[in-house]
Image: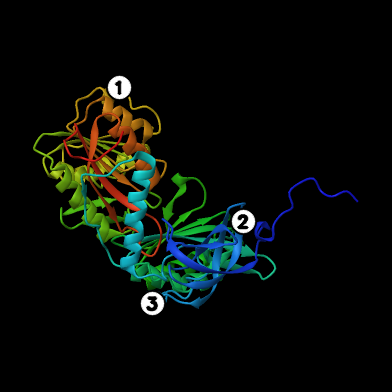
Amino acid sequence: MKASRGRSRQPSEAPAAIGQRVEVELERLSHDGRGIGRWQGRTLFVDGGLAGERVSARVIKARSKLIETRIDQVLQPSAERVEPACRHAALCGGCSLQHMPHAMQLQVKQQALAQQLQHFAGIQPTHWMPPLLGPAYGYRQRSRLAVRWDRKRAHLEVGYRQRFSNDLVEVTQCPILVPELEALVQALGQVLNALDARPGLGHVELIAAQVPVMLIRHMQPMSPQDLERLRELAVQHWAECWLLPGAADTLHCISGEGVVPAYRLADQDVRLEFAPGDFIQVNAAVNQQMINQALQWLAPQKDERILDLFCGVGNFSLPLALAGALVTGIEGDEQMVLRARRNAENNNLQSPHFFQADLSKQLDKQWAETHWDAALLDPPRDGAELLVQTLAQARVDRILYVSCNPATLARDAGLLTARGYRMEKVGVMDMFAQTAHVEAMALFVRGTRSGSAHKA
């Protein structure tokens, strides 16, 4: 037999098999809080690991030079490891950082933001600001639970998706939720499994408004008995139950008085109504701090013209108007625009004006060619690449960027600094404690200043 002409594969180059158990010493943390070590010459990421630990882990994805794993057993724990507050933390895909102290979570998020700004845009801000902090647990005022009908067991699974899987973990607690929603989670599974329509349920959304809301998506009609069971659950928890059997315009309330959900900004004495399904911030405490910081950083003066992009139901627009600014809010969802207008009226504010526009496209001339003293934008995860270029071309003096994705913030920051802006201030906001999600706020000011460190 002829010898193989190709170079023989060395044992250390053998691919790791999915599910294979490996042991590794972890040296540091990644930007999303995973432990990093070396195994057979390759970089290995361990979900659930901490720097300084020796762990065994199971391979979930393997490439030539990089292996992703999830923790199987902690052989030598770090002194900083903490016991998760939730019994489902090992499986649930919702929270990935419950094993590390809250202060360490903040360090990971700040380092992730700094690394992204440096890597993608070569930017060092003029000022790093302290993080905005909220409760480590009991903060989340909105959550969507998945449901799945198991035909073999004739059982409806209610919970969250498992980490690295499409399977569900059935939850009986969720300590990151505000208490009134966690109480609903504890009762929900049993009630939904008693419904005649349970095989056709879609998802359940829980919202902590002034009156807690359950929103249930269902694909087949509810029987009178089903409706009564849901009403009883709502009454027991001082909540209202809304059903969504089809399109958004079929949403209706079956319990209570059908009160429009609302939340309050105590520092501004503003009440904001919204509909189930509208975007609102999940963390009330951090949201209030975020608004206060936006007002402080932008320092709006009386009659300044401020553009609020992705304005939603007026979360930033109304406080800016109360501070004396002339605010124009733009939002892609026409129904949310109508609610923003109503919120302004309900709070006796005549100056804000709200319009609908697709903000993934170029800004219309009527706004792009208007003089704006400042702009605020709170885009989705894919950022606002076109919009920041339009704002720079319009020579807007101050741009406040609220971000839920450090990578797209860094990309858009690079576009702004290349067009003569400096990143004056930036800081993280702990909107999603116990998770690796990084929220940040950055202020860009037109014109460079000697000594400010940035690279276009």
Q: Do tag 1 and tag 2 residues touch (Cβ < 8 Å)? A: no
Give the image location of residue 262, x and y in percent.
28, 55
Amino acid type at mark 1: Lys
Mark 1 or 3, closer to the camera: 3
Q: Earlier in the sequence, mark 1 or mark 2?
A: 2
Residue at image location 30% in from the left, 31% down from the top: 418
Which residue, given by chain and number where applicable, does mark 3 sit on? 79
- Is residue 434 rendered to the left or right of residue 400? right
* Label 1, residues with CA under 10 Å away: few <14, some 14-19, many ≥20: few
- Compute the Cα span from label 1 to label 2: 49 Å
Amino acid type at mark 2: Ala
Amino acid type at mark 3: Ala
Mark 1 or 2, closer to the camera: 2
Q: Nearer the viewer, residue 31 or 224?
A: 31
Which residue, given by chain and number where applicable, does mark 1 sit on? 365
**Which secondary structure lies at badge 2?**
strand
- Is residue 111 rendered to the left or right of residue 174? left
